[in-house]
Each structure stands twice: as structure tokens, then as C-alpha cells.
Image (cartoon, rainbow, N blue to C red):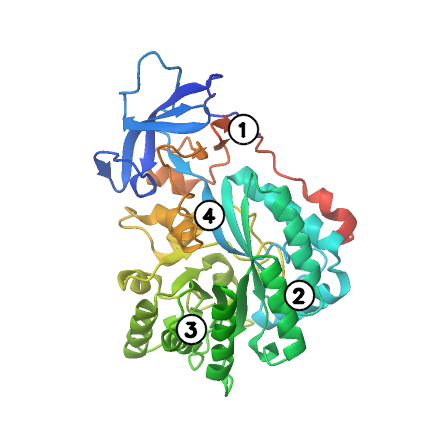
Amino acid sequence: MSTPFLFLPDAPHFALSNATVPAIAVTASTGPAIEGLASVDIVISNGKIDAVLPAGTAPAELPKADLRQGMVWPCFADMHTHLDKGHIWPRRPNPDGTFMGALDNVGIDREANWSASDVRTRMEFSLRSAYAHGTHLIRTHLDSIAPQHRISFEVFSEVREAWKDRIALQAVALFPLDKIYDEAFFDDLVSVIREQKGVLGGVTYLMPDLEERLDLLFRTAAENGFDIDLHVDETEEKQVLTLKTIAEAKLRHGFEGVVTVGHCCSLARQDEDVASTTIDLVARAGISVVSLPMCNMYLQDRHPGRTPRWRGVTLFHELAAAGVATAVSSDNTRDPFYAYGDMDPVEVFREAVRILHLDHPLTDAARVVTTSPADILGRPDLGRIAVGGPADLVLFSARRWSEFLSRPQADRIVMRNGMGIDRSLPDYRELDPILGA
């Protein structure tokens, strides 16, 4: 394990001096910024941020940790994950790396193995990793095909309570919309979402009566006060564009809840006029979009013996330019939908910058794993460095973007309530008993 690049003062009142911060993630004025990075002193008192001052101006009498221009970020928000699927790869890999290979093998593993104990063990493992990396807010989609919806939501409820002081957790009920007319199932699912204060999810794809199914989805959400978070157009097929139909449904119903859509891969396959019209509708409907660059690059345009021709991601820049709230997230972790990952938003950010070209300039890029996802999830108190808020921070030795994006930042320090945490990651061997090592 690498040696920490600095040691924090053992005092209730101290300053992080000569820090570099992404200005977009700081609520106080930071003064001049170069490519979105500003130089500040951060004063911490009894676990809270007392002040953000120009670099070198913290009171002289305060104990100080000199960061020597090292970066300080707020703790991260990871708004689209699958904690119930995580880490099943050793037990059920994807044989060919395709979307259908993922769908089929997750289904087989779910039916064979997803007991409460199995789901809890894997979910806790992922949360321990996320916490060590500096994450404070996670939304997970839970496979909600009967009877799994009751098992996984009950486990999630227990885990959410156990982790409430470390990670704020939200859950979405994920199910295919072809099940929405199964009245007994859907009524029970709605009752579970209501009991667990969850979000109504679903997977949209081309079907003759998609509008009618979306009408039922939106009516149900409105009647129960649910927000909506959908998996949308996760395909390279140009003819599949349900995003437009979803935006029209939200406008038609005058739905006042938050609607979030993930993936939207096929939007990038459209002709310019179709894409532009769809984006305008999404903006007018006030729908938020989250891109999952690592998973989508892994799955999309995968064909045996053929090099992929496109990156698999949505029209991120165009959506943001139209005023659509956008963010990126980690998605799946070591399961048939994505063979890799470690619930690390720094990895997600680093790869998103490369895949989505979030650079040149990087001025506002930090928002995609901090302020933007926190705002979309209704937690504007998180994902930012706020005076008066808790000193939940991630400290890096990297001083500028080139340094930050060129290494995994394994020597980072994670602070919660002004104190460094144990950043030890769980050992994969802990999962051997359930994965059949």
C-alpha cells in the first residue's frame, strides 16, 4: 500500500492549505480559476467546513495540512448502479460479451442463487469499496421480477439503514414493461416501492402499445408520488428510439415528478434531424439523462471477429448544450453486463473524459460525478464543498488535470466529517464462499 501523501492535523480546528479545487463543485467564491481549478484554503472546524478562503489566507494560528496544490473534491455521487448484480462474474460470466449474453446469464444466476444472504453479501462488498473510494450517494436499480423484488428490496432496506451514516442509498424497481399489465405482480411491486420509499423504474423497448404502457407507468407514479428512472434504448439499433416516446408521455401527463433515463445509446445512431428533435423534446420535458460510458463501450457494437465502430454512448454534449441535466455513473460491477469495475467514481470520471471527450476544456467536467448527479437525485446538499456542510472530502496528490487523469489516484485520502477514514478495500477472497471459488 502506498504511503499517504500527507498527514491530517490531530485537531478539531485546522486548515487544508494550498488546495486546488474544481470551482464548479464549491458553493463559496473561489476567486480566479484556470480550466475550472482554483487555489484555496479550506478551514475545517469540528467536522464541518468553516470557510473557503483564497490560498495562503487561513488564520496563521490554525494547524495546517499543506496540500502543495493537491486537489480536493467533494465526496462523489454514483447515480446509476446495480448493487444486486455486483460480483457474480466468477460464478456466471458472460460467454461472449454481448447484451443478450448478459441478460440471459444474469437471469440464470438470479433464479439459482439470489437469496437474501447472497444479495446482502455482494451488496455490502460493493458498498465497502464505494465508501473507501470516496462515494457518499448511490442509487441502485434492483431487478424486480417476482419473487426477487421482495427479497432484494427487503435486503436493501436493511442495508440502507445500516449504512445511513456513511452512504445515502436510493433504490429503483427495475422490470421489463411487458410485465406492467400483470395486475397482481404490478400491484405488489407498487406496494413494495411505496413501503420502501423507492423509485419506479423499468426497461423500455419497441412494442406496439408502448404509449399505453407508459401512460399506466406515469399514472401510477403520479398517484403514488413516485419519481421515475428508466433504462432506455440500450442498443445500437437505429430503429429503436423510445426516448422520444417517453418525453412525449411526460409532457402529455404534465408529470411533476423527476424522470431520469439511463443509457440512450441509440440516440447517437440517429440522423441529425431526428436526434435534434428528440433532444429538444427531452429538454422541454425536463428529463435528466445519465450516461454509463464504461458499460456501454463494453457491450455495444460487439460482434465476433469485428472491431467496434462506435463508442456506444449517448449524445452527451448535445443533450447538455440543450439544457438537459446530465451525469455519468458506474453502472454494473463485475457481472455479465460489465466484467470489470470497482465502484470507483474516479475511474468512471477518468474513462468518461476519454470516451465522451469531456476535455478541451475540462472547466466544468467535475460536475458529472459530483453536483449534477446529486442534484438529479434530489440531494443538493451532497456532491459539493459547502461552507457549513460536513467536511466530506477526497484529497489527491494530483495538482492539475493531466496528473489527475493519468493515474488511478490510489493514494487519495477520504475524509468524512473532517477525519480520514480507513481506505482498505475488501478482499475478493471474502466472496469465495458464495461464488464457489
Residue 31's place in the image compared with 90, above or below, is above
Q: CA distance from mark 4 to mark 3?
A: 25 Å
* Residue at mark 3: 266
Residue at image location 57% in from the left, 59% down from the top: 338
Check disc 4 and report its element: helix, strand or loop: strand
Counting residues from the start of the chain, the first of labels 4 and 3 encountered is 4
Which label lies toward us, 2 or 1? 2
How far is mark 2 from mark 4, CA to CA? 26 Å
The residue at which mark 4 appears reads as: 77
**Residue situated in front as seen by the camera: 143 or 233:** 143
Say if 307 sits above or below 432 in the image. below
Pointer 4 local density, CA inside 10 Å: few below 14, some 14–19, many at least 20: many
Label 3, label 1: how far apart the Cα atoms are:
42 Å
**Helix, strand or loop under label 3:** helix
Classify residue 361 as left or right of residue 366.
left
Name the amino acid, label 1: Ser
Name the residue rendered at 68%, 56% in the picture: 154
